[in-house]
Image (spheres, rainbow, N blue to C red):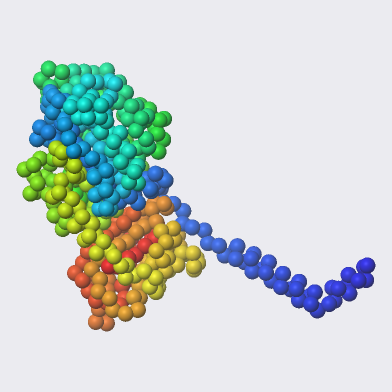
């Protein structure tokens, strides 16, 4: 037996097969050795929910209430619920249009400052149950949440903290009332992706007949941390929006823009909803912020937030909406565009026309990424590993990225388009799972035998879109000039 074995070992075929096995092991071992570690995250980084939210990009705000019927923007708090009667109410019509226009989620004003509730809350008489709408049996919140589900849209709620109708506004019992209503909404209306806390607290109001001005201490009255804990215990995945976050921050204006420099990071400790003088900070965020709180750009398709017949001719044009898209989504933010239903309870023809025209503009502009799968040369590649190669920015895969070695905070990507192509937009995306990094960059085109700068920017974040005078070129160079740590770029697109 022993002899037989040693004879086998001398057999050339046996030796050859052993050699193959040994070299396979060697190759596997050296591959393992060569695996280059990914860059360490630059803290803070987004949560999984924040990442998913960022990818929604465009959501709709729906301002609909008694104001729709009284032609007001801020109801005083004494308007009769009997005025609420949208006889043609059809949220399926809203969703059909919104979906077609590219919206991913809808946030409904369940109660605005006048205190009227769009659902039959058991804690107040000031609601749809005392209106002629569906004989007092209607529930707008339920119908909208159901329509969202039907059309595959996410559903979010707005519940005004300021209530001009309540006699006890300013007292602790109002906070209990407000929390009870949040409990109703979060328990009975399905998954809620975003809770929108408005920072507005105007002062005067009806307040149960007191007709006076009331001031509250904005920093302490609402005791937000208790409220947020209560809601999170019911729906842990909800994202809280307010001037101060904690998950999404206000953009600091209602005109439809974020600053060109937009950090997702900010230090929230000293911020609270409605705090005066923070607008500028909210527009930019801060590079050394201690929390990840992306900005949301809320603006209306009309001059007002609620429907007013006289504004039918003042609806923003598709071109104006496209510009807002560039100054919100194109600056690494999400757009929350308000589209208010009319007195019938339907989206108005003029708004529909604009929305669909806007969508057409977006689709036409960004139809073909001229950089997709082109050749890319990077000045540096992390550990010279294909895992972090330059071509990852044009592979259409959001999970791959180009990165440099630790400590290298600059670098260039040269995109070879193969033949001259006319371009007027560049889109850059950072792999924000590892934090926001880039502080400054330029984009150049190869024109008449030399590089000519066509665009420049500061931050990138989730997405940065830059528009420039169209050029015809076969090569484009993106240069990262400064970054918090090694740049981590997941996508470069040209249109
Ligand atoms: C503001 C409110 O006062 C407006 O009426 C509107 O709801 C807007 C979204 O937020 O603070």
Tell me if I can see residue 161 in this picture: no
Total marks drawn?
0
- Above or below for 332 versus 241: below
- Tell whether 113 sits left or right of 380: left
- Tell whether 390 sits left or right of 277: right
Kindly give the residue lying farthest to the left in the view shown.
310
Asked whether 127 or 33 is in front, the reply is 127
- Tell whether 449 sits left or right of 114: right
Residue 325 x/y as whole percent: 22, 54
Q: Residue at x 36, y 57 (%)?
A: 430
Q: Residue 132 lies in what quarter of the image?
A: top left
Which quadrant, please, contains the C terminus? bottom left
- Tell whether 417 sits left or right of 23: left
- Above or below for 246 versus 328: above
Asked whether 487 or 14 is in front, the reply is 14
- Above or below for 484 versus 478: above
Q: Residue at x 16, y 53 (%)?
A: 353
Tell me if I can see residue 6 in this picture: yes
Residue 481 x/y as whole percent: 32, 63
Asked whether 60 or 212 is in front, the reply is 60
Q: Residue at x 32, y 30 (%)?
A: 185
Q: Residue at x 21, y 55 (%)?
A: 356
Asked whether 230 or 70 is in front, the reply is 70
Residue 442 x/y as whole percent: 28, 66
Which quadrant, please, contains the N terminus? bottom right
Q: Residue 82 lies in what quarter of the image?
A: top left
Residue 424 x/y as whole percent: 23, 68
- Above or below for 274 versus 422: above
């Amino acid at each position: 037996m022993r002899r037989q074995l040693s004879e086998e070992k001398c057999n050339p075929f046996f030796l050859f097969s052993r050699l193959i096995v040994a070299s396979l092991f060697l190759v596997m071992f050296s591959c393992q050795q060569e695996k280059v570690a990914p860059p360490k995250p630059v803290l803070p980084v987004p949560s999984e929910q924040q990442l998913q939210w960022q990818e929604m990009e465009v959501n709709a705000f729906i301002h609909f209430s008694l104001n729709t019927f009284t032609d007001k923007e801020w109801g005083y708090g004494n308007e009769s619920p009997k005025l609420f009667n949208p006889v043609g109410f059809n949220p399926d019509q809203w969703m059909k249009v919104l979906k077609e226009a590219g919206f991913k989620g809808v946030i409904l004003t369940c109660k605005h400052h006048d205190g009227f509730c769009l659902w039959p809350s058991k804690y107040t008489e000031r609601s749809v149950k005392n209106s002629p709408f569906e004989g007092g049996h209607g529930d707008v919140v339920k119908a909208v949440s159901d329509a969202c589900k039907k059309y595959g849209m996410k559903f979010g709620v707005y519940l005004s903290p300021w209530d001009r109708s309540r006699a006890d506004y300013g007292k602790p019992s109002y906070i209990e009332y407000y929390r009870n209503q949040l409990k109703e909404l979060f328990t009975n209306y399905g998954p809620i992706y975003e809770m929108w806390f408005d920072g507005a607290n105007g002062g005067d109001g009806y307040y149960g007949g007191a007709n006076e001005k009331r001031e509250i201490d904005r920093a302490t009255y609402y005791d937000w941390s208790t409220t947020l804990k209560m809601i999170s215990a019911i729906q842990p995945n909800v994202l809280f929006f307010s001037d101060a976050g904690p998950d999404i921050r206000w953009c600091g204006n209602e005109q439809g823009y974020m600053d060109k420099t937009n950090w997702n990071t900010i230090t929230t400790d000293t911020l609270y909803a409605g705090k005066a003088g923070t607008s500028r900070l909210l527009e930019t965020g801060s590079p050394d912020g201690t929390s990840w709180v992306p900005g949301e750009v809320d603006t209306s398709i009309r001059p007002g937030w609620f429907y007013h017949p006289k504004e039918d001719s003042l609806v923003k044009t598709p071109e104006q909406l496209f510009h807002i898209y560039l100054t919100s989504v194109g600056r690494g933010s999400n757009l929350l565009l308000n589209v208010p239903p009319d007195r019938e309870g339907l989206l108005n023809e003029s708004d529909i026309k604009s929305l669909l025209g806007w969508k057409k503009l977006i689709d036409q502009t960004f139809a073909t990424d001229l950089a997709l799968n082109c050749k890319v040369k990077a000045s540096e590649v992390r550990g010279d590993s294909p895992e972090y190669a330059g071509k990852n920015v044009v592979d259409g895969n959001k999970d791959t990225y180009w990165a440099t070695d630790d400590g290298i905070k600059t670098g260039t990507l040269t995109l070879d388009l193969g033949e001259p192509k006319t371009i007027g937009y560049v889109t850059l995306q950072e792999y924000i799972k590892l934090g926001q990094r880039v502080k400054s960059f330029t984009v150049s085109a190869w024109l008449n035998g030399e590089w000519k700068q066509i665009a420049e920017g500061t931050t990138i974040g989730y997405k940065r879109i830059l528009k420039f005078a169209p050029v015809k070129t076969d090569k484009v160079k993106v240069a990262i000039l400064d970054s918090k740590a090694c740049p981590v770029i997941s996508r470069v697109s040209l249109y």
